[in-house]
Image: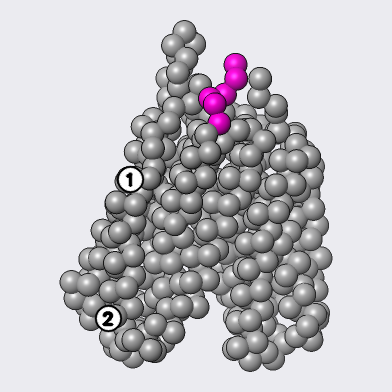
Amino acid sequence: MEKNKVSNYRWVVLIVYMFVAALTQLYWLNFAAIDTYLESYLNLSAMKVGFLTTVFPLLFVILSIPAGIIIDKKGYKFGVGIGTIFTGAFALVRLINPTSYAVLLISQIGISIGQPFVLNGITKLAVTWFPKNEEATAVGLGSLSLFLGMIIGLGVTPALVESLGFKTMLLIYGIIGIISIPIFYIFTKTKTTVLEEKTNEQEISYIDGIKKIYRIRDFILLGIVAFIGIGVFNGLLTWLEKILNETHGFSMQQAGNISSMLVFSGMIGCIIIPMLSDKFMKRKPFLMIASLVGIVTITIMIFARGFTTNAINAIVMGFFVVSTLPIILTMSEEIAGEKFAGIGAAFLQLLGNGAAVLIVPIMEALHSATGNYTLSLSMLVALFGVLFIIVLFMGETYKKKV
């Protein structure tokens, strides 16, 4: 059966989604960018300040699956709308008392509750509004917005605090957050898919459907891919500045520049790689390339010493490795089907965030035990090797819709 008529309004819906998704990442990292300042300004321990950031992956692991179920059962606008309300409203809560750690923590908890409802909605948006040959592109653009939010959170926040002050920074971010709610509901229309319009199709209970997709071999393998890939990225991004400083003697500014190059090239890759995947109607080869590039680039990071070499290495890594996130999310929908697009994405996001909770401390534990990051980076190389082998055993998920 042919999919719903394609509407140009799909781009408006996607742009609004990108705005809200970017805000979730901005609020996730805004305090991480000024942790030293907060320790002094609010007289807090490093652990307390760090928890303002780590609360996000912790709650994502808990809420990812429930959020995915709600998105699938109630639709894209309903599910992502919940996330938008939590994100915008709790961004304003911090203004109640900007010098209270309890208020800041409540604000972060509220925003982190909304995050899985927003991030797990991208595949549902893609299958609802976009034709098959644009789905990976739509997911890629949605993923790109996450990196935009990260860059703003890490780069703009310190500048705002230094120039305008901590409270003014919170006020600006709070205003942006609260206006995201009416923007989302005004410009996001409700649209059903052909699948939702079928009335004579045999019904299957939602729980049975979830059990069914979790028994699909390729879906389980894709879950392992997400666990390794997203987990390695989070671990590397968390410690990259420290790795470059200790291993290669780069200054904080030099290390920060290389980190920015990695994220920015990943943003560019999130546009180009999914477009190529749609054009060639293939998903698996891009995961294989990413695995091999991950092995090579992290190995280079262990031994390379020059700034230029490490900068080019980071650009290559970002473009080919980071950009596979939208490919992975698109594959989850292609395996699980349109009806379970939200729960499929939720499962992969849960695994990725769960891996981050494991890999980040393991890398630091290996660093503490050996006095350097060689063993930590070698572990990441080995994980990419495992990822490549897993992808070899997966089938191609791209299927033309009829």
| Residue 114 in the image, given as x and y percentages of width and height | 35, 52
Magenta-colored stretch includes residue 188 = no
Side of 353 where 78 appears, left or right: left
Side of 256 where 107 appears, left or right: left
Q: Nearer the viewer, residue 46 or 168?
A: 168
Residue at 71% across / 52% down in the picture? Answer: 273
Secondary element at tag 2: helix
Residue at 63% across / 81% down in the picture? Answer: 257
Identify whether 60 is placed above or below 333: below
Q: Nearer the viewer, residue 266 or 293?
A: 266
Q: Nearer the viewer, residue 361 or 235?
A: 235
Circle 1: residue type: Ile
Where is mark 2, residue-wise? 167
Identify whether 383 is placed above or below 54: above
Identify whether 342 is placed above or below 303: above
| Residue 31 in the image, given as x and y percentages of width and height | 39, 75
Circle 2: residue type: Lys
- Which corner quadrant holds the N terminus? top right
Residue 19 appears in which quarter of the rendering? Answer: bottom left
Task: Count residues near mark 2 (Cα–Cα under 10 Å), then give few for <14, some for 14-19, many for 20+.
Answer: some
Where is mark 1, residue-wise? 186
Q: Which residues are magenta?
A: 1-6
Residue 40 appears in which quarter of the rendering? Answer: bottom left
